Image (cartoon, rainbow, N blue to C red):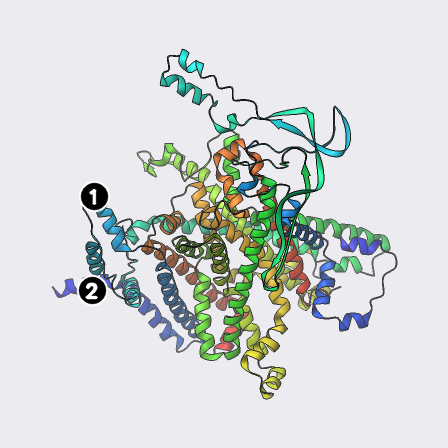
């Protein structure tokens, strides 16, 4: 794609050699990344998802917790937002009013049939008693509800940094609707808004991945750094341990740890961090080995000798001299691993051992997809699946483009 | 009498002698051959890694709540016996659970190395070897088939993907006329779109978690009004033996094949994404090297150039990673097994970990998977050192 654009461009921009040769590693990576169309598109997609996720309370029209559950619209289908219909055009988008008709259960049939259990069975069979039949809504096409922007709603924290004592609270939301709530993606069994839950879930899932990757980075640096820097016996002991951890399948190990967690008495927040730490801490093998190999080759370089002769401590040499020489690889590797960590969290949640229902995480929302009731009667609850797939794809494409961009030899051919 | 003691001694310790004689054979060979010296090193390393794995797995299982004595006593309780704390403690002493963990680990490992006994599953109240039985082999073949499927898709498509994107010389060749170069650029662009499409399809296997994929396929069957291929056999063939009165039952085989594709497809597709990424990166890396350029300058072109130069060189790192690929595929298997309703070792593993807290069974399965991975790594290392001159040169020179 870029080659086509480059060809269409008539005047080639002269490459500024000075700028190119004095550019830092990250500028080079950035320049190479900008040439990958698919990576850039995925990057913007990812960025907007993360923005939506981080400021979810602002973008979400409805409180995703049980407080915001809409008792008058449970198991409701998505409410379409329209600009025009047969009654005319409106610049302000609108949705219709949804009414729940009075339950018209005809129990007299039971009596006329003699009040026997057979009649009750027949009634159950006909589906009149099941909850999706009980929650049919009629659309009042003549009663429009108009969308409002920057409406007042429930109060939320925009940002909170405890250490600095900063806490910003606000109660405006991007959009809302007259008379009641808007459910663009429908509601679940409790009347919680699917769209709002999904937005909140994005950040929960991504932040688990961030915590896990930070822990992973720390453990890898510790093991790889120690092993590579000291070499010899320390190296062989640590590396055979790493090798042993590497051959054991990870998900069963996460499972065992999650089972242990569920037997402990911990709050949901602690549980959330514990899961992130477990996922991160057990995943050090691949990165740790790469770090160790790199440091093993780098530690005999002259600049390390110079640092040693100047009296720098081992820790300082590792942190200030060896690790920075590897930082671009570390960052790229971390980004590439995002989807795998998210998938690990999802797998745990799927088995009911990760986060559990009141929490909004993508894993929890995905887990619902295995409920036959949802598969048959509430297809709109598959909306989080769509978001999840797009999110992972965006991560993978960004990771792919970054991997190519971070490779210093990739544009020698150009 | 003496013979009896000897036979029972040998049957109790057969695995140890097998391991020892393999080591001895390698040692004897290693005295005269550098290659066998390397193999002996790998063999010893593999055994050490296995020992470490057993330690990790064993200590991991300590974190699961409950222990054997409680499970046996809980079972006896359901049989109508009344149980007190003193009974549980007595049972603990009888099973040796009051010993510190290292002692129990040592006894487990020695039983394992002497005669391949994986211990006793308290939740199932039978020996682990018996409880696992063929199920481990079933999982093993599932993973191998899934892996094979993944390679079958990933290798050709990965190569194709690398092939279509990496032809910058066509775009810049100054010998071509302007029109020719323009046509080439258009061709390159469509190639890149093809590459994008291939990558999207393979990444979809990664982005759709495998349980969702399995669920979706089952749902499609349900909506189509057919019975979903859940489990291994349909009800009709479940109880039929493989060999009936009229010889081999082909009906059972077709039924088996009609069910088996689903788990293989699901775990295979998830593995394809990573494989394809790897193959693509390897081939792109190799094709940028100077020897490829030199071959192109000599006039080798087209498929011959790709097959003989970059592809051939990227095969050995790929082959080297078979062991870890197997581990990755097995990683996905438990969840797929839960969704599809398989009864293999992966399903047993989930059951043992999440439902019954059966430490012995779970430890045994994890250990066996690690064993397979380590043996595969050992085999690929040995084969590569034997046939790939680059590897041979580096390991044999490094060994001295």
- For label 1, the residue is B79
As displayed, is residue A275 above or below residue B288? above
A135 displayed left or right of B85: right
Place of residue A212 in the rendered image (x, y in percent of width and height, measured from the top left): 53, 60
**Mark 1 residue crowding within 10 angstroms, few (<14) / some (14–19) / many (20+):** few
As displayed, is residue B373 above or below residue A104? below
**Mark 2 residue crowding within 10 angstroms, few (<14) / some (14–19) / many (20+):** few
Q: Are marks 2 and 1 on the same chain?
A: yes
Q: Earlier in the sequence, mark 2 or mark 1?
A: 2
Q: Nearer the viewer, mark 2 or mark 1?
A: 1
What residue appears at the point 74 percent right and 24 percent down from the top-left corner? A86
B113 displayed left or right of A104: left
Dot 2 falls on which chain? Answer: B
- For label 2, the residue is B9
Most distant residue in the top direction = A112
Tag on residue A315? none
Q: Is residue A346 visible?
A: yes
As displayed, is residue A332 above or below residue A107? below
What residue appears at the point 61 percent right and 57 percent down from the top-left corner? A160
Q: Is residue B160 visible?
A: no
Toward which corner of the image does residue A402 lie, by quadrant? bottom right
Toward which corner of the image does residue B158 lie, by quadrant? bottom right
Q: Quick one: A341 or A246, which is closer to the camera?
A: A341
Label 1, secondary structure: give it: loop
What residue appears at the point 39 percent right and 71 percent down from the top-left corner? B44
């Amino acid at each position: 794609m870029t080659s086509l654009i480059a060809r269409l461009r008539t005047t080639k921009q002269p490459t500024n050699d000075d700028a190119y040769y004095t550019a830092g590693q990250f500028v080079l990576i950035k320049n190479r990344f900008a040439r990958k169309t698919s990576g850039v598109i995925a990057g913007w997609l990812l960025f907007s998802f993360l923005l939506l996720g981080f400021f979810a309370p602002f973008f979400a029209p409805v409180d995703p917790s049980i407080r915001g559950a809409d008792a008058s619209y449970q198991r409701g289908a998505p409410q379409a937002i329209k600009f025009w219909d047969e009654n005319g055009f409106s610049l302000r988008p609108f949705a219709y009013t949804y009414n729940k008709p009075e339950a018209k259960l005809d129990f007299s049939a039971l009596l006329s049939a003699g009040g026997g259990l057979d009649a009750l069975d027949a009634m159950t069979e006909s589906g009149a008693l099941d909850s999706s039949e009980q929650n049919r809504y009629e659309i009042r096409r003549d009663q429009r509800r108009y969308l409002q922007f920057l409406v007042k709603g429930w109060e939320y924290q925009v940002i909170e940094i405890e250490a600095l004592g900063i806490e910003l609270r606000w109660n405006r939301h991007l959009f809302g609707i007259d008379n009641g709530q808007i459910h663009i993606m429908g509601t679940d069994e409790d009347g919680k808004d699917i769209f709002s839950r999904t937005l909140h879930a994005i950040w929960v899932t991504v932040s688990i991945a961030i915590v896990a990757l930070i822990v992973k980075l720390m453990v890898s640096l510790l093991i790889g750094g120690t092993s590579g820097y000291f070499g010899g016996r320390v190296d062989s002991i640590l590396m055979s341990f790493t090798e042993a951890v590497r051959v054991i399948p990870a998900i069963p190990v996460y499972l065992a740890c999650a089972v242990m967690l569920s037997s402990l008495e911990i709050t949901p927040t602690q549980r959330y961090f514990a899961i992130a730490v477990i996922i991160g801490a057990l995943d050090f093998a691949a990165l740790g080995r790469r770090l160790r190999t790199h440091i093993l080759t780098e530690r005999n370089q002259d600049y390390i000798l110079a640092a040693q002769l100047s009296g720098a401590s081992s820790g300082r040499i590792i942190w200030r001299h060896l690790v920075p020489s590897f930082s671009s690889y570390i960052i790229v590797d971390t980004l590439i691993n995002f989807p795998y960590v998210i998938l690990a969290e999802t797998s745990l949640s799927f088995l009911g051992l990760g986060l559990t229902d009141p929490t909004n995480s993508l894993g929890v929302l995905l887990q619902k997809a295995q409920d036959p009731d949802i598969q048959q009667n509430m297809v709109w609850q598959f909306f989080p699946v769509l978001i999840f797939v797009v999110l992972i794809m965006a991560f993978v494409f960004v990771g792919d483009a970054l991997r190519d961009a971070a490779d210093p030899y990739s544009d020698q051919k150009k | 009498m003496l013979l009896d003691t000897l036979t029972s001694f040998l049957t109790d310790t057969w695995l140890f002698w097998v391991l020892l004689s393999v080591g001895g054979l390698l040692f004897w060979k290693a005295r005269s051959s550098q290659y066998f010296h390397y193999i002996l090193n790998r063999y010893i390393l593999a055994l050490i890694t296995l020992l470490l794995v057993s330690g990790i797995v064993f200590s991991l299982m300590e974190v699961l709540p409950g222990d054997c004595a409680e499970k046996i006593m809980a079972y006896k309780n359901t049989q109508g016996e009344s149980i007190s704390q003193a009974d549980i403690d007595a049972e603990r002493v009888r099973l040796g659970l009051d010993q510190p963990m290292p002692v129990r680990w040592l006894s487990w490992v020695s039983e394992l190395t002497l005669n391949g006994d994986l211990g006793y599953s308290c939740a199932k109240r039978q020996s682990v070897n018996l409880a696992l039985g063929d199920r481990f082999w079933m999982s093993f073949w599932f993973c191998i088939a899934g892996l094979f499927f993944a390679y079958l898709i990933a290798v050709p498509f990965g190569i194709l993907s690398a092939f279509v994107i990496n032809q910058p010389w066509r775009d810049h060749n100054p010998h071509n006329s302007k029109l020719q170069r323009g046509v080439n650029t258009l061709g390159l662009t469509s190639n890149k779109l093809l590459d994008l499409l291939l990558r999207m399809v393979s990444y979809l296997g990664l982005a759709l978690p495998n349980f969702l994929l399995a669920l979706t396929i089952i749902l499609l069957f349900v909506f189509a009004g057919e019975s979903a291929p859940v489990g291994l056999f349909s009800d009709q063939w479940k109880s039929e033996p493989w060999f009936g009165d009229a010889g081999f039952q082909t009906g059972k085989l077709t039924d088996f094949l009609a069910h088996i594709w689903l788990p293989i497809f699901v775990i295979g597709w998830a593995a394809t994404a990573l494989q394809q990424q790897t193959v693509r990166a390897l081939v792109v890396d190799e094709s940028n090297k100077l020897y490829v350029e030199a071959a192109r300058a000599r006039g080798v072109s087209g498929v011959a150039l790709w097959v003989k130069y970059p592809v051939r060189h990227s095969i050995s790192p790929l082959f080297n990673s078979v062991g870890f690929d197997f581990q990755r595929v097995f990683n996905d298997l438990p969840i797929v097994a839960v969704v599809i309703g398989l009864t293999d070792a992966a399903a047993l593993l989930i059951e043992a970990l999440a439902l019954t807290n059966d430490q012995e069974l779970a430890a045994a399965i994890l250990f066996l998977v690690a064993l397979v991975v380590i043996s595969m790594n050992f085999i690929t290392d040995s084969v590569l050192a034997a046939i790939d001159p680059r590897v041979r040169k580096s390991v044999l020179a490094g060994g001295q």
